[in-house]
Image: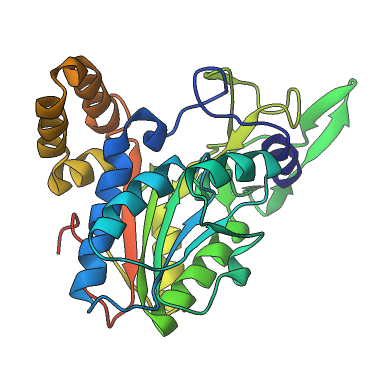
Amino acid sequence: MEACNAYYYSTRDPLGRDGDFTTAPEISQMFGELVGAALADCWKRAGAPSDAIYAELGPGRGTLAADALRVLRAAGFEGEVHLVETSPVLREAQSKAVPEAIWHDGLADLPVRPLLLVANEFFDALPVRHFVGVMERRVMIAAGGLAFDRDGEIIERSPAREEAMHTVATSVAQCGGVALIVDYGHEKSAPGDTLQAVRGHRYVPVLVDAGEQDLTAHVDFEALGRVAREAGSTVSDVVTQGDWLNSLGIGARAASLATANPKRVPELEKAVDRLCHEEQMGQLFKVMAIHSPDWPAPAGFAQ
């Protein structure tokens, strides 16, 4: 999974109608603007520390960063922008959307500063491991193709995700800051195989055309929260994306945009539905926040 995704992302822009999938920031500017508003509010209530930086993990085309930073800058945030991205193709797109960005190959390279961090559909692409009983499930060559070496009830684990979360949570706990994690997955840990492949906006067999399709697995938010707490961060409840966006005022933002440009009403209504409706992204996608014990909790989460 790690090898396939490393090749996949380094050789193409997978986003949009002509790509393999579409993320929330590409659906509407409202998503990034509300992320920026949540970060700006938390930053101001923390005393608006001047050394804070905006950081994003796996920032796609830079669309989310551009939209969030527009709101953050309007709120008085003047900090640096740091993007964790290894794909040269996507870095080029990000440089057009966020010209002031500073890039890093890994989380460990981020500055030791208070973080305003976003990870939207980042953790789902990190590799998972499968276990059937006590035996690890592996991939083998069979009949000229790839196959799994065993079947049965799957227990899915992701040391890579836990390592990434530990790095973020340790920095937040020690240096201050807040991190918003947005991804599809489950609130509670549970057995099951969630590994999936997407190509051309359709699900396809995971072991076919290795490296030519997007491989992801559902995020175990309970496991990430446990790691974050152990690292010293405060962890919010896990809420659905629909509930989170609605609590932050996506309806009011859509109305404001519609008033400014009435011709956009159908587009805006469709975007809100796609981002928030339970049969679209609203229920499957979850949001969790971690923050320094010295920082206030971000808006949009039950207290």
Residue 282 visible, this orientation? yes
The N terminus lies in which quarter of the figure?
top right
Question: Residue drawn at (42%, 49%), measured in percent from left and top?
Answer: 65
Instruction: Tell me how many marks there are.
Output: 0
> Along the horizontal axis of the image, is 27 left or right of 213?
left
Q: Position of residue 90 (x, y in %)?
A: 61, 41
Residue 238's image quarter? bottom left
Q: Position of residue 142 (x, y in %)?
A: 87, 26
Query: How was this image coloured?
Result: rainbow
Q: Position of residue 205 (x, y in %)?
A: 65, 22
Residue 12's image quarter? top right
Question: Residue drawn at (23%, 32%), measured in percent from left and top?
Answer: 276
Q: Is residue 279 above or below residue 169?
A: above
Q: Nearer the viewer, residue 189 or 235?
A: 235
Q: Nearer the viewer, residue 84 or 227?
A: 84
Q: Is residue 64 above or below residue 280?
A: below
Question: Residue drawn at (31%, 36%), measured in percent from left and top?
Answer: 29
The C terminus lies in which quarter of the figure?
bottom left
> Along the horizontal axis of the image, is 227 left or right of 287?
right
Q: Nearer the viewer, residue 192 or 218?
A: 218
Q: Nearer the viewer, residue 28 or 144?
A: 28
Residue 239 visible, this orientation? no
Q: Position of residue 72 (x, y in %)?
A: 29, 58
Residue 235's image quarter? bottom left
